[in-house]
Each structure stands twice: as structure tokens, then as C-alpha cells.
Image (tube, grey):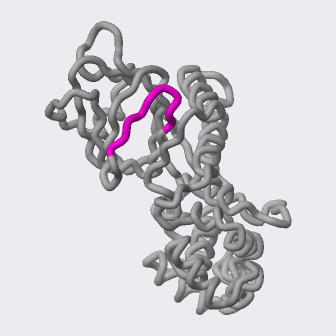
Amino acid sequence: MMNSPHYFRERPKMIDPLSDVIAMLQPRAVHTRRISGAGRWAVAYGEFGHPSFCIVLDGSCRLAVNGHRALTIQAGDFVLMPATPGFTISGFDSVRAVRMDPQASAARVGEMRYGTPRGKADVIMLGGWFEFESPNAALLVSLLPSLVHLRDSERLAMLVRLIGDESAERLAGRELMLTRLVEALLIEALRAKPDEEAPPGLLRGLADAQLARALRQMHSHIARSWTVAQLASAAALSRSAFYERFTAMVGVPPMEYLTQWRMTVARDLLRHQELDVSEVAQRVGYGSTSAFSVAFSRCVGQSPSRYAAGRQADQPN
């Protein structure tokens, strides 16, 4: 578990925004299990909300995630869902899906078997889920694609197997090892170049070389008094072209993205460090504490002082 923020601690000159987001999400509490299916089977899960992943070890099956086209997943395929919406997984025969409670299924121990209980499986997967400790998880996850499907990634296969092995053991340093492995898995999966049909978000922005320069500047120099014109100059684009491209690719206008990121960092600082509101305001680019308080209250739903007081009340005596 991460108990202190990564911000302002020996920060390098240029920050990688994707690594920034993953570190701020603070993944933890990893759970893994073997999953198999045989015969005529189909199961439909409701929305889970937590991030989940799986890699197909052998065979193949059908996966239909809400809001996406159904697809066939086969040996070597990797699937990541940062917020795990409802989905149906099945064999290839037409059969009525059995409704499954994702919370109850997550609490089960041991292999999850679908369809015929004995005999050779038609598909074998290693799946898992984990949690994001960050109070900004919903905002940060909104910057990421809802479904990642990759084929034949040896590096991801290795990471999933390491996570499975580490989860099964009770060795010293297990929690930290799992946290680092999941961070590596997330970055490895998410930095794959998004296709043209991917929804707007941080990955689409980072895939654009010019927008990526502006995003790196925002993350590296969060306290600077940025204007759209300055960010456009960093991207080597005209102001209007930059604004339009950024909004289309990232999904929000540049200054709105910057404000969201500043509030994300501010919440992290107020949650983990003994800083007064005025110092946090300065660190995230606000010369006026009152202006920061207004922006924070609008974004978070409560004043920074109340948010900090709530954090302190949660601390053990």
C-alpha cells in the first residue's frame, strides 16, 4: 500500500503522464484465480467496478463487454478492464447465460469452473482483480480506455504469471511486490498504441506526438501559470488547432484537463502530507488560496480544509 504521495519527491525534469496516473491510482490488494470452461456454458456478470484482467492460457471463448462489440479471445490474449463493467463470457454454442453476482464471485476461493464440471476444458485462463486506493480513482480511470484487448504479448503473459505466483505465496514483501507488478502490468497494457476507434482519453492524447509534449509539460510543471497559447506553443500548434485537437483526442479542453489534474494532486497532498491549504494551493499552481478553495470545492464537492479534516479523522490514533 502506498501511504505517501509520489509528487514533489525528487521529481525528474520531465514526467511521463501515464506513469503519473498509474502511480496516483495506487493499485493494491491483488487477487488472482484460475478460470476454465467446458461444454455448453455462458455466464453474465453485472458491473463490478474494480479493475480486472485475464490472460488466456489455452483454448478460446467469447467475451461480450457492455458497450463493446463481442470478440473471441484465444490463447495468448490479454484483457484489461480498468473499471469492469457488466460482461458475458461463454463458449461458442448458443445457450442462455447464467446470471452471476460479481461481488460474490470475487469472494470465492479456488478455481472458477463454468459448464461441465469435469473433463478437459475448452478454455483455461488466469484472471485477477485489484483495487485502486486513490480517492481520485473514478476521475483517473475516466482518462483510460474501458477495455484493452491485446494479442500475443509475452511481457504481459510473464507479468500475469508472476502476479499469480506471488498471490499464491505468503512470502515477505508480498504486498509491495504485488503492487509493483500490477503497476508494471497496467503500464505495459495501457501504453500499447490505441487504435483509431479507441474513445478519447489520456492514451489517445499521448499517442499524438505533439499533444504528448503539452501533456508532459502540464504534468512536469503543474504549478506554472499555463495558458492555452503557451501549451499550444509547446505542442508546436496554433492555439485554435491545439485546442480543437486536444479536446477531440483527450475528451476535455486543455485547461479543464489541467484543472482536473491539479485537483487530483491537491487531494493526494491533503490526504497524505501535513501541509496547510495555502501551501497545497501554491504547489498546484494557485497564487490565491481563495481561488484554489473555490476550484477545489467545485471539483471535489467540499472545501480543502474540510477534506483535510476528514482525512485526519480517518487516521488511526
Which residue is located at x 74 percent, y 71 percent?
Answer: 213
- Horizontally, is 286 left or right of 121 in the view? right
Closest to the observer: 246 or 221? 246
- Horizontally, is 101 left or right of 188 in the view? left
The picture quadrant where one finds residue 184 is: top right
Residue 75 lies in the magenta-colored region: yes
Query: In the image, is residue 13 above or below residue 150?
Result: below
The picture quadrant where one finds residue 280 is: bottom right
Closest to the observer: 236 or 8? 236
Closest to the observer: 90 or 278? 90
Which residue is located at x 48 percent, y 26 percent?
Answer: 75
Residue 316 lies in the magenta-colored region: no
Which residue is located at x 49 percent, y 31 percent?
Answer: 55
Whole-percent x, y for residue 60 in the image: 39, 26
Magenta-tinted stretch = 70-78
Report if residue 10 is visible in the image.
yes
Identity of the residue furthest to the top in this view: 119
The picture quadrant where one finds residue 8 is: bottom right
Closest to the observer: 83 or 9? 83
Report if residue 137 is visible in the image.
no
- Horizontally, is 284 left or right of 66 in the view? right
Whole-percent x, y for residue 310 in the image: 49, 67
**The N terminus is located in which quarter?**
top right
Query: In the image, is residue 65 above or below residue 137?
Result: above
Identity of the residue furthest to the left in this view: 96
Whole-percent x, y for residue 206 in the image: 65, 64
- How many marks the image carries: the answer is 0
Whole-percent x, y for residue 74 in the image: 44, 29
